[in-house]
Image (cartoon, coloured by chain):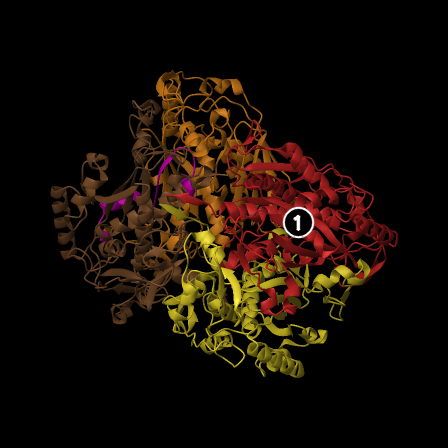
Chain colours: A brown, B orange, C yellow, D red
Amino acid sequence: MKLFTTMSSNSFGTLFKLSTFGESHGTAIGGIIEGCPAGLKMDFTFIQNELDKRKPGQSKITTQRKESDTVEFLSGILNGVSTGTPIGFIIKNENQKESDYSHLQETFRPGHADFTYLQKYGLKHTAGGGRASARETACRVVAGAIAKLILKHYKINVCAFVSSIKNIEVGDDWIERKNSIVQRKKEKNLVRCPDEKIAKKMQELIEQTKKNGDTVGGIISCKIENVPAGIGEPVFDKLQAELAKAMLSINAAKGFEYGLGFDSTKLYGSEMNDIFTSDKNKNIKTLTNNSGGILGGISNGMPITFKVAFKPVSTIMQDQNSVDKNGKQIVLKGKGRHDPCVLPRAVPIVEAMAALVLADLLLRNRSSKL
Amino acid sequence: MKLFTTMSSNSFGTLFKLSTFGESHGTAIGGIIEGCPAGLKMDFTFIQNELDKRKPGQSKITTQRKESDTVEFLSGILNGVSTGTPIGFIIKNENQKESDYSHLQETFRPGHADFTYLQKYGLKHTAGGGRASARETACRVVAGAIAKLILKHYKINVCAFVSSIKNIEVGDDWIERKNSIVQRKKEKNLVRCPDEKIAKKMQELIEQTKKNGDTVGGIISCKIENVPAGIGEPVFDKLQAELAKAMLSINAAKGFEYGLGFDSTKLYGSEMNDIFTSDKNKNIKTLTNNSGGILGGISNGMPITFKVAFKPVSTIMQDQNSVDKNGKQIVLKGKGRHDPCVLPRAVPIVEAMAALVLADLLLRNRSSKL
Amino acid sequence: MKLFTTMSSNSFGTLFKLSTFGESHGTAIGGIIEGCPAGLKMDFTFIQNELDKRKPGQSKITTQRKESDTVEFLSGILNGVSTGTPIGFIIKNENQKESDYSHLQETFRPGHADFTYLQKYGLKHTAGGGRASARETACRVVAGAIAKLILKHYKINVCAFVSSIKNIEVGDDWIERKNSIVQRKKEKNLVRCPDEKIAKKMQELIEQTKKNGDTVGGIISCKIENVPAGIGEPVFDKLQAELAKAMLSINAAKGFEYGLGFDSTKLYGSEMNDIFTSDKNKNIKTLTNNSGGILGGISNGMPITFKVAFKPVSTIMQDQNSVDKNGKQIVLKGKGRHDPCVLPRAVPIVEAMAALVLADLLLRNRSSKL
Amino acid sequence: MKLFTTMSSNSFGTLFKLSTFGESHGTAIGGIIEGCPAGLKMDFTFIQNELDKRKPGQSKITTQRKESDTVEFLSGILNGVSTGTPIGFIIKNENQKESDYSHLQETFRPGHADFTYLQKYGLKHTAGGGRASARETACRVVAGAIAKLILKHYKINVCAFVSSIKNIEVGDDWIERKNSIVQRKKEKNLVRCPDEKIAKKMQELIEQTKKNGDTVGGIISCKIENVPAGIGEPVFDKLQAELAKAMLSINAAKGFEYGLGFDSTKLYGSEMNDIFTSDKNKNIKTLTNNSGGILGGISNGMPITFKVAFKPVSTIMQDQNSVDKNGKQIVLKGKGRHDPCVLPRAVPIVEAMAALVLADLLLRNRSSKL
């Protein structure tokens, strides 16, 4: 008998660490959070609220599949305070319609992981995505919410927003505004874009695209404020390297850049360099922030800024050619309840992953008086 | 006494693993390679040749600092064959001119890690970069070369090339040509760009920029051929996530994208999806390769393609404003021997990191008949 | 506000890995098993049966606390076969009598972890042991059972038994008998000692000790049969080093030895050395097995044998002096439902941990034709 | 071609981490130390002195093979102070007499790892032990010395001594004496046993055994003083579990016990329990220290005590039967320069590994004001 073995990692982080399990169509998904300091007050309303921003069925421009995505904590918390031991949690799967996917059992959906999972594990996983389903990211949002509670102690905050949908994009100035303002504005519309007018256009495009049975992608921008200088590790675990991995581990992400990113390739060094200066208190800052708050893999005290590109959702409501597992040509019908655009629901995931990276690197960086 | 503690990682990889040590101005840099299968024939000429592509002083468009960058293997190899035990190696530092950097001891160079290292470790490191120096990447090239020898057994090959310098860029067709052709062509010029005419323009731009005491950046494209379907891990250690981390851990890298990358945000799902098909032998392929050879974090058998953005080198031969460690305004003179453009020397580093990622994920993915 | 941070590990294993969470008095305990090969047939009856050997209330010489210890698998298994993705599971806590422990809230029980947890985390954990409770080992038995299913493919089997309780001990010949025989005999009595007569004496001692409100300890011996030569890693992860860590991580374990162990210090080298020989098929074996099946950290094909010492249970039904958290002298009353001797229930835990070590090292050791 | 792949670990520790490379007969052995806090003053004389206690040829009861074992630091230290970056170091191999081992190329030495390495890696390693040689432990002594410098800041000290050679043993009171006294006394004789009279007998036994061409083993006891309460991790990384792994990873170690160890199995719970009490300053202690300073995997503030059993050295100067790699019976001649007893040289190794464990767990346990 041939068994397929693989050294998978289902964990993220080193000191503050999340491990997850679960498929879209099992009993539950869940995870373990390690490294949460003992004595942290849990804000359960905040945590559930973060989950609600990711859950399906939240608006007319997301999938109409319904899941309440209620997190149940099983351990590591006593009287509302973390005990320092691992925080186990589950989120029950409520909406398991096997029939939705029965037509897919023997075929490979374009843009999906059906084919690659079969190649890797030697067996077809549960219909509808199994472990590859973005449903797994709900666990990241739970852990990310707890990471945000840790960051709050340091006054660090994370704010992501939709900066483009297809060709519709916001101005470059939005990344420079205060997170508190952007946060408030972006939650006023379904797209999670802080620019009211642009958001309206984006929403119209998404709705029209949905009508056409098609999908669109876009870019999410993110800023982390108040990160003290000195966070991040040199060499392999550079702050930007950890962020890049975190972001590219999100379903449908196709690219990552920080600071000026790809645009920096168009500048001369004399234009790109951020000049150091100091304020009247002799605090050292830079005049510009082309570097996105990171030098040599380590935060320099300026805001950390980055962008993530998301491809259009692969499941479209149109006929598509494909093959079955024997290589026979077939036609796939577009069926089921899917997102025409993943970005509004991806915003809390980007924030969660950024918070996980920061909380981990912050804890890895503690100075101690020996 | 206040000691600064940090949980740094100086290792890359899980099963095939490189750990490095060393600063630009110590006695030597070096590393340990773990997980190399026993019985692999070492090709020392090939390994040194890879190093030579990265070494300083190799051409008139790189820094004129000279280092022979000769690797000495200390363990793990017997009679030219790997023994399965860790491969220790060192590369001696030959060109340590402390005086080159004496003017920098108390000041922060724009774009460099002087300031952030001081914040992190509480002390000023060796002048000239210390651990933050790109000299550390020589160790990556050594390990990457051994990774390439492993990949060769699977017929997998990695080829990176310079696809743009500032605004000068090659056509999109180059990424689609066979690696063997691109490899040969790119090594015919100093820039490591496979398009002869474009390479000439790039070289001129670099030379002119150098004369102006300035620097330029650009983009490196990379393709990995013959990766079997099934390589890569779902969830956090997706193939693209590992590649992204690997690339963003390289000095001066500002962005990463794979497949269509950021451009995919401009397409509809119906345009983006790669349609599955099969050849006459019922081998399953896709008609296009917008996804860059990866679906759900796992290779699909198509070539893996990605791009990395590099900012212009931070050290320029011009006066720049800055501050010293007390926050006092100063003017930094441009001095020393530096690269006007890092990309020609970054090509072997991109290849090395890609090879490390692939070798690791390949070994993590072995099926075994129990 | 002072938060206590620690880098705890709640995981065991490298490639075949168990991570656990949960306290004795929360909603549930549980874990994640990673690295289980895809395609392994799950034998749920066997797994639950292993758990039943550990569960409280199973006989008159164990604690009378009742827990059904029913494992619920949440992911990683489809149609009774492992999918290669992480196996999440929970075991609900049924018997949470807070009142049993209310008298302990402010005091430190001798031999228990109340004091040390308070020092570590800065807060008193749940009464009755919290994360320090041996209840956590139920998760290890679940993972160990799955590890045994993997080992079965290699014909490897693990058998532990009680070889001494206080001064009552079995003959040295029992470790040399076939596991299949020992396995059958040991399950015929409540003590899990394969020697019927000795087992009877042990049971009498345990019962008498219980009447006296006291507790006893003893030694568990274990043998692993059919381990092929070549398993285990040189240097730090030697087979015996991993076993030692595994065993000393079990509650109440005080010592570990393999092969002749401490007795080997009484021999000359000429007496200790196992002489190599070969059978008629030229298979290489040793004439004796003083080394316990391991040479240089790697299995040599002979049975692996080791012993683990367990101290008497710390909770006794007698008055004991102690202090409260302010250092005030108090007298602790002996109350509650506890084991007079932990060894019968520790046998499946020793086997589980041994199986985890072997499965992990086996998977780490696969040869692959490149 | 068949390649043998294995996931070896050549690292020890999590936050304070040592990775080693090197064989007995290559150019050099060496390693990388990560996690050393920045700002630690290096005491090079102390470090070399620790190495000298382990080096061969130091006295007439050790092997007469000569190696100066001079450590060369290559990175991570600037002006005698740690910089926080990885400390790379090498120790050159000076005494490589291939001819000493030429008679062993095709045969398996009893008690040695020749056979198991061949099974694991598919090829015969360097003669004379290769990676399995205890020479590798020199690297541990280097890292252990630096760990001791860290521990010194916390006033923690580690002292190991030879407590038995074969049947000659010291009294139980020695483990209770102050480390400073034991340390001074044990270094006054060649055996490293603090009891002058017993040491003399031990030395005589070793010398007589050497004359007979035989070898002897024994026990090393170790005590760690001034460990604050709260160090160690619950569940898998218990303080005793990490110590057990550390000790069993040393060549020739056959057993580990802490506190009363195996003897605790002979006591009732009422005899074993250490009763908590408090001094006039309300500091909480225990009246006895049967538990060896650890409860629930975490230090309780009492001295940590443990013992390690070492088998007699496998290389004897007598003829022994064995087989060659084809299974043919042969007779091995006793040749070469070997230790008649490994314990005097193992004392610094036991201390080094204990220091590594403590330094790591100490750094993993830092509290931080968020």
Give the SS element for disc 1: helix
* Residue ID for mark 1: D350
Residue at 29% across, 48% down: A350
Under mark 1, the amino acid is: Val
- As for residue B269 lying within the magenta part, the answer is yes
Instruction: Point out residue D356 in the picture as x, y percentages from the top left corner.
Output: 58, 46
Instruction: Point out residue B333 in the picture as x, y percentages from the top left corner.
Output: 40, 16
Quarter of the rendering containing residue B80: top right
Asked if residue D124 shows in the view, the reply is: no
Residue in the foreground of this view, choosing between C74 and C64:
C64
Asked if residue D58 shows in the view, the reply is: yes
The answer to whether residue C274 is left or right of residue A166 is: right
Which quadrant, please, contains the C terminus of chain B? Answer: bottom right
Instruction: Point out residue A138 in the picture as x, y percentages from the top left corner.
Output: 30, 57
- Region in magenta: B245-270
Residue in the foreground of this view, choosing between C128 and A332:
C128
Residue at 57% across, 49% down: D357
Residue at 49% across, 24% down: B127
Question: Subunit of mark 1?
Answer: D
